[in-house]
Amino acid sequence: MIAEDFEMVPVVRSNQTLLGVVTRRDVMEKMSRSQVSALPTFSEQIGQKLSYHHDEVVITVEPFMLEKNGVLANGVLAEILNHMTQDLVVNSGRN
């Protein structure tokens, strides 16, 4: 729709009767809402990479967690510590 520069596209049934039209604005609004709500937050992405096995914490390091020089980013380290602290408090039963 955007690539072909269409402003409106008809929506038809299989018997070729017109149901209505979809505008470029309708499509763009729907795409922007669905993309924003479907994306996990930075915190959720980091939390998905943490797992616990017995008394050990296993962290799966992904490329997005690293600086250009290959070092773990400070924000990632802070988020890992935040998740681990929250899990410790929840599992210890303290508020």
Image (spheres, rainbow, N blue to C red):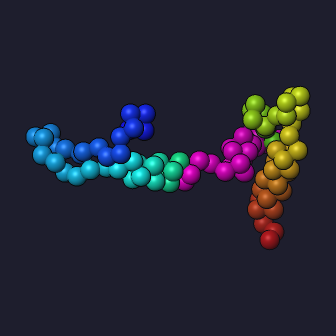
Q: Is residue 56 above or below residue 88?
A: above
The front one of 73 and 9 is 9
x and y percentages locating residue 82 in the rendered image: 82, 55
Q: Is residue 40 above or below residue 60?
A: below
Residue 91 appears left or right of 72: left
Q: Is residue 9 above or below residue 93?
A: above
Residue 94 appears left or right of 4: right
Q: Is residue 92 visible from the viewing direction of this image?
A: no
- Residue, x 56% and y 51% (percent of image)? 36
x and y percentages locating residue 22 in the rendered image: 31, 49
- Residue, x 35% and y 40% (percent of image)? 6
The front one of 24 and 60 is 24
Quadrant housing residue 49: top right
Residue 26 appears left or right of 56: left
Q: Is residue 89 visible from the viewing direction of this image?
A: yes
- Considering every residue shown, the one lying at the far bottom of the view is 95
x and y percentages locating residue 76 in the rendered image: 82, 44
- Residue, x 38% and y 33% (percent of image)? 4
Q: Is residue 94 magenta?
A: no
User: Where's the C terminus, which quadrant?
Assistant: bottom right
x and y percentages locating residue 16 in the rendered image: 13, 41
- Residue, x 73% and y 45% (percent of image)? 46
User: Where's the N terminus, which quadrant?
Assistant: top left
Q: How many marks?
A: 0
Question: What stretch of residues is rendered in magenta?
Answer: 36-56
